[in-house]
């Protein structure tokens, strides 16, 4: 029996940009190029869309990032 599977990949990347729109456009351009140049993503997994939204990190994300830096420095 054939089944259809709808899949989603979720990810986060830190990027320097002039604006939220610029950040979104930079990542969209890179991801679209990657997907279009991947025969497996285009033909086997049939990638149909890419969607994302830029945002400024909240205070909890900043705290986690600072904790990670302190831990990394301690582990050196």
Image (cartoon, helix red, strand yellow):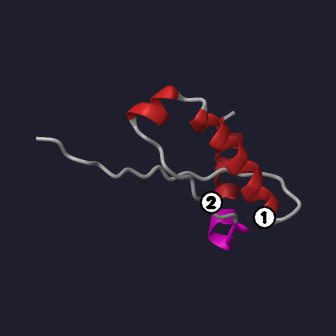
Q: What residue lies at 66% left-to-right and 50% top-to-bottom?
A: 13
Picture residue at 64% right of the left edge, 43% below the top: 31
State the separation of the CA atoms marked 2 and 1.
25 Å
Which quadrant of the figure has residue 24?
bottom right
Magenta stretch: dominant secondary structure: helix
Q: Is residue 2 left or right of residue 72?
A: left
Give the residue at mark 2.
64
Task: Judge from the rendering whether residue 38 lies leftward or rightward of residue 3; answer left or right.
Answer: right
Q: Which residue sits furthest left?
A: 1
Q: Nearer the viewer, residue 29 or 74?
A: 29
Residue bearing mark 1: 21
Residue 25 percent coordinates (x, y): 75, 55
| Label 2 element class | helix
Residue at image position (34%, 52%) is 6
Please say if 66 is above or below 38.
Answer: below
- Identify the image quadrant of residue 63: bottom right
Mark 2 or mark 1, which has the lower sequence index?
Answer: 1
Q: Total marks drawn?
A: 2
**The magenta segment:** 55-64
Mark carried by residue 33 = none
Q: Residues within 10 Å of mark 2 (few under 14, many from 20)?
A: few
Residue 47 in the image, given as x and y percentages of width and height: 47, 44
């Amino acid at each position: 029996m054939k089944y259809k599977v709808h899949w989603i990949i979720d990810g986060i990347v830190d990027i320097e940009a002039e604006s939220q729109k610029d950040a979104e456009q930079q990542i969209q351009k890179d991801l679209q190029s990657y997907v279009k140049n991947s025969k497996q993503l285009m033909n086997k997994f049939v990638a149909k869309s890419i969607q994302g939204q830029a945002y400024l990190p909240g205070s909890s994300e900043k705290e986690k990032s600072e904790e990670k830096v302190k831990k990394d420095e301690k582990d050196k």
